Image: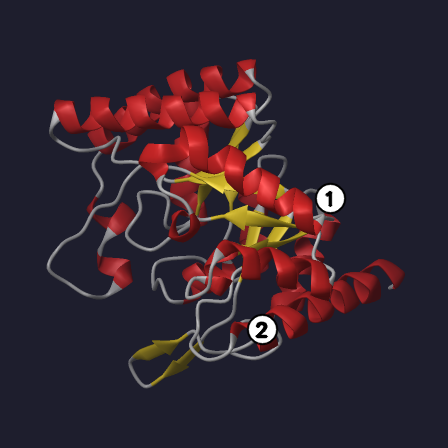
Amino acid sequence: MQIVMHSYTFRTYPLAEAFANAKRFGWDGIELQPCHFKRDAIDTELPAAIELGRRYGVPILCVDTGGDTISDDAAVREKAVRQIAHEIEVCGRCGITLMNGSVGSLRGPSKNYGDNGSTLATPVHYERAAEAYRHLGALAAKVGITLVFEIHMFCLHDTIASTARLLDMIGLDNVKANPDTGNMFSTSTAEKDPAALDLLKGRIGYAHFKNCEKIGDVYNYSVKLADGHVDTAKWVAKLCEQGYDGRVCIEYCGAGDPHVAAAADVRYLRETLDWIRRA
């Protein structure tokens, strides 16, 4: 597996700092998040970011995308599809083969993640998303790109089950899932048992790891991957059991010095993978 650093880890630093520390701590590449580039200027900013990475010997292995393809406003949906299509074209031209994104979010009055997202969805939301991504997935296939939906709070794809339902409707081999253990932990409706990944077997195109701890009613993400309340090793073991050998990404979302997390988290995941493979 290639282990990817999410550039959001260094969101309070210039992109060069993310590349420098990815090289320093032995990461295989980075995921480029919009905190480090302007999506409306991707034509120039993505090539510049790729060139910056080359100077450090660190590739961009994933680029973030997404938009509101499920809005009740057709103009909003059409604008989102146009933007994502353009980003696919630019990424394909630049040799990017993986894009991580979203079909859009659904938010109600509750702050509880589980009361939002797929809980609020109706069949029409799935139909809109599927229609958009059958088109976008076909465009991506032409330029060798896999699109993945990050399982993320507030999104239509905020659980393994809702993501699987969406993938079933899209029906394209290059449109897959990106399970995120930390996001699922804080979403009450999301699956907590790694066995649930069987619903996505063969349809996982990327995986995000982050940890989290619940303190009272608060979810705290200022924990390293080996800490917190998510047993990351069990999720890694399940991916290995399924034969997944693609890219995985660690995203540190917490406070404090990101250099500490960047050093510790990649070491932990490499050691965990080695231990699982030797078992």
**Percent position (x, y) of residue 190?**
40, 57
Taking the spot 23% from the left edge, 32% from the top edge, the residue there is 70
> Does residue 205 appear in this view?
no
What is the tally of numbered marks visible in this picture?
2
On the image, which quarter does residue 270 sit in? bottom right
Q: Is residue 234 left or right of residue 166?
A: right
Residue ID for mark 2: 259
Sort mark 1 into few (<14), some (14-19) or many (20+) by Cα contacts within 10 Å: few
Placement of 103 over or under 106, stated as above or below: above
On the image, which quarter does residue 130 sit in? top left
Identity of the amino acid at label 2? His
**Percent position (x, y) of residue 93?**
55, 21
Whole-angstrom CA distance, mark 2 to mark 1, is 26 Å
Dot 2 falls on a residue whose secondary structure is helix
Mark toward the start of the polypeptide (2 vs 1): 1
Q: Is residue 27 left or right of residue 118?
A: right
Placement of 107 over or under 43, stated as above or below: below
Taking the spot 50% from the left edge, 21% from the top edge, the residue there is 140
**Percent position (x, y) of residue 36?**
43, 50
Identity of the amino acid at label 1? Asp
Question: Residue reaching furthest right?
Answer: 278
Residue ID for mark 1: 245
**In the depicted view, which residue is nearer to us: 11 or 133?**
11
- Residue 24's disc number: none
Taking the spot 32% from the left edge, 22% from the top edge, the residue there is 132
